[in-house]
Amino acid sequence: MYTITTFTTVEFDLKKSDVPQNEKPILDALFKFRQSLQTLKKDSLGAVTLADVNAKAAELGQIVRELKQAREENYGDFYDRNRCDDVLDTIWMQIFHIWDKLVELHASLYPTYVTLVALSRSAEALRRSGAWTAADVDSLQRRLAPIDEAVASTEGKFVANLARSDAQPSLGDRVPMGQAVLASLLNRIHRTVRFLAADGEDLDELLAPLKTELDGMLRQLSSFEQQGVEGYSAEKLAPISKRLHQIDSAKGPAGNFANSDAKTGHATIAGLLNECFDKVNALVANLDSVSSDSPLYQTYRALLAVHSDLVRISTNQALQGDLARLSLALESIQQRLEDLEKQRVDGIFVPSGHTFEAAVKLPGQATMHKLLHDCHSQITKIVDPVSLPVGEALVSTYELLVKQRAVLRKLRAWASAGWDVKKDVEQVEAELRKVETQRVRGLFVGPSQTGQLAAAQSAELVAGVDTRILEMGSDTDAVPDGQATISALMDECDSLVWQVRCMATE
């Protein structure tokens, strides 16, 4: 007879008070890490890639090294088991469970799996955003079409190209393992896409006139784009902008338009409204051009070059799905963008030798702001399908920015209705400045490491902080995951602050 002992339910046997003082921060880190694993599985709906697992494993490895170092200081070579070990056991079980699903996939099918995961995350992100258009749905359907066609051509099975043979039309026993995982993921994507498509197809009667109006404004704005700056003016854009803000501010508490309680159609309206806002902002920026003799011109040209390089990367098929090469290609471009952002003071580009008051009056600030926003949007579009989750060090920063973005969207609606929101905007700006202090050489490191760095006399004396992060680009493993996500959120918040302030001064 054999006795099998496990450590899956023994956490309550060892109390936190039994943990040595210098291990308690590590125990807290393990609790947070375990929660982040559960969040990853929940947010990804179980569709996790090797890149996700490797990132979490590297993060856990750093915690384990800190635990080992603490125990060497406490005990030497021998130590008593405590609650840290029990929590660590449950974490390893979760990671092994995720690995178990991945090893069910044949190696030849893994690229298809990664493609489906990217599609699933894009579709789910749209669904959660509550705002999309028919064009967004069409884009997803076009990305799905080649996969559907390939599966249909191989008897409904997922088969890599190398496994197909014209001489053997029947697959027989050549079906790679992992069919159920891929089929389930593909079906889920189709269900999400059908849900997204239904929102536009089953439009409520009360929303139909609003959709028609927004479609008309979108056509008008598109016509202005085609005509160029000679075909429109600020006076022509003003009534459209005013009407868009009226529609935005008239939304109900639950985000519903036209006082409609219908379950479908609101996301389509929100998507059209956002598209109209984007076009208005772009057209306004075109009117506020940067002349070649402007003090802003060199920065403007540098931003244009960054945007051009980002567009080139986004269309390079060889980089799609290859996180390592993609990160390498983006690294220098993001550094250039961060260097340019350092020229901003309270959202205004201040050229060398100019005061803030003088820079505010320089023509072209709107164009610069829009171009910077476009660069961050390009980075998000490039990184999002293959991006890693936000690292544990940046979770609180991410949650804070999401909260401030929601506040700013409300303030924009209130400002468009004529309310005085200046004090509210100042409170949000104070929170955003706190986030800015979390940058170390252009990288976000999170509030905990920022506090330790501020308290240290020098980088070499920082205790408990991974100082590799101070060596820009020397070791990307030391940089918390989610830099592009946090940067994009910061830029969106800055953009909203700028919009609200402009409306408040009208």
Image: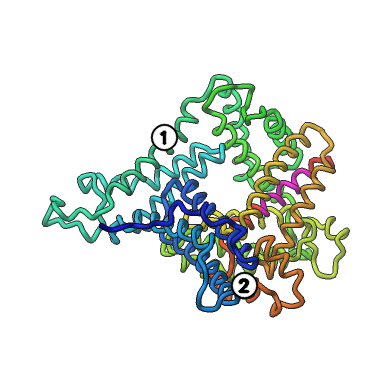
Q: What type is the residue that disc 1 sits on? A: Arg
Q: Position of residue 418 (x, y in %)?
A: 81, 33
Q: Looking at the image, which residue sits at the far top? A: 205
At 41% from the left and 34% from the top, the residue drawn is 194
The C terminus, quarter of image: top right
At 53% from the left and 53% from the top, the residue drawn is 36
Separation of residues labelled 2 and 1 (CA atoms): 46 Å
Task: Give the extent of the magenta segment.
Answer: 490-500
Residue 309 vertical placement versus 117 (above, below): below
Q: Looking at the image, which residue sits at the far front? A: 1
Q: Nearer the viewer, residue 360 or 410?
A: 410
As helix, strand or loop, the secondary structure at mark 2 comes to: loop
At 68% from the left and 45% from the top, the residue drawn is 403
Numbered label tally:
2
Q: How is the image coloured?
A: rainbow
The residue under label 2 is 466
Q: Position of residue 125 (x, y in %)?
A: 51, 44
Would you say residue 242 sits in the magenta stretch?
no
Q: What type is the residue that disc 2 sits on? A: Asp
The residue under label 1 is 194
As helix, strand or loop, the secondary structure at mark 1 comes to: helix
Residue 76 vertical placement versus 388 (above, below): below
Name the side, left or right, on which 360 lies relative to 50. right
Q: Position of residue 69 (x, y in %)?
A: 57, 75
Name the side, left or right, on which 27 lies relative to 318. right
Q: Is residue 379 visible?
A: no
Q: Quadrant of residue 487?
A: bottom right
Q: Nearer the viewer, residue 225 or 13?
A: 13
Q: Position of residue 456 (x, y in %)?
A: 75, 73
Q: Nearer the viewer, residue 87 or 158?
A: 87
Sequence-first tag of 2 and 1: 1
